[in-house]
Amino acid sequence: MFKRILFLFPIFLALTVKTVSAENQFLSFGIQQAGKLLANPPLFMYEFQRNMESTNPLPPGKWIGASYHFLGGILIVPLPDLTSAGNISGKLRLHAEGRMVPGLPQLDVVGGYWSSLLTDMVVDKNATAADSDTKVTDASLKGSYYGVVMTSSLEPRVRLFWSYKFSKLDMKLDLNKEQDILGSKVKSFNGGMTEHTLSAGLEHAYAKNRKWIIQGGYGITNNLITTKVSWYMKYVEFGLSIYPESVFIMQPQLNFHLNF
């Protein structure tokens, strides 16, 4: 039972394989991902959190915004990920560009929170070590981030922005008894991670409520590189992130937002 729960977290069990060859490849890939999860569970889960973290600036003339991360992506296939089970992000403009002093950048604060609803589905608080099956007795998976974004105009339709972001992830998974997973005795996953990320990006508005955004960032704490290209419209953002250090190197995203 626990092995099925373990593979549920990366959610690649949602992909269907029909041939024996494909099934073997999928099983090999699943074992690889399970090994990565066991080696560093928080870092593995943070790959999903990065998809919902937003550090692009508020549009000119807007002072507050909220967004919801609807779909992440695995292997270029858009799928609901762990964070889309429950998340919210917000942005607040503290200073409009050039309002107080000519040339002074726009300043926004950003932040967000997510908590996976899947954990409640797999927990059996009445499970004991005497049970024949391995069960999850407690589980928690959540994360948050906050930061600042500075934005300056290069020309009327092009803006350059820089950001600093602090991210935190917490996870906990306790079993009623030890389980042999890939040769290791496992009874719990407990831990978390933090990351400090510096980013820079370019925004090009080519039509009303239409713009392209290109940005790249570097996570100082864990040496994580992120690049993202997104198509930003009035209410929807389609993005594609590239994580060179990840097995899921390219991950598409779909986000909804409202700006006022």
Image (spheres, helix red, strand yellow):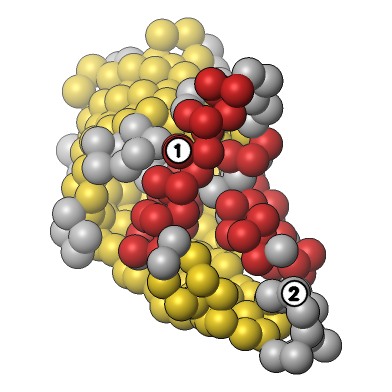
Return the residue nearer the eye: 93 or 55.
Answer: 55
Which residue is pictured at 59% across the width and 52% down the height?
7
17 or 75: nearer the eye?
17
The residue identified by callout 2 is 133
- The answer to whether residue 170 is above or below residue 226 is below
Q: CA distance from mark 2 to mark 1?
A: 25 Å
User: Which quadrant, please, contains the N terminus?
Assistant: bottom right
Q: Is residue 71 left or right of residue 156?
A: right
| 144 displayed left or right of 151 | right
Could you say which is closer to the camera, residue 222 or residue 122? Answer: 122
**Residue located 23% across and 18% down the image:** 155
**Marked residue nearer the N-terminal end (2 or 1):** 1
Residue on which disc 1 sits? 29
**Whether residue 140 is visible:** yes
Q: Residues within 10 Å of mark 2 (few under 14, many from 20)?
A: some
Residue 76 placement (x, y as % from top left): 49, 24
Residue kind at label 1, given as amino acid type:
Phe
| Residue visible at 47% across and 8% down in the picture | 207
- Number of marks: 2
Is residue 73 or residue 21 the one in the foreground?
21
What's the residue type where badge 2 is placed? Asp
> Residue 186, relative to residue 210: is it above or below?
below
Q: Residue 38: where, in percent of width, then height? A: 41, 64
Asked where in the image residue 229 lies, by quadrant, the reply is top left
Point out residue 122 in the picture as x, y percentages from the top left corner: 74, 67
Q: Is residue 63 left or right of residue 194?
A: right
232 relative position to 44: left or right: right
User: Crowdedness of circle 1 by 10 Å Cα count: few (<14), some, many (20+)?
Assistant: some
Tag 1 secondary structure: helix
Q: Which percent across, then down, holds residue 72? A: 55, 37
Q: Residue at x 52, y 38 (%)?
A: 27
- Residue 111 in view: no
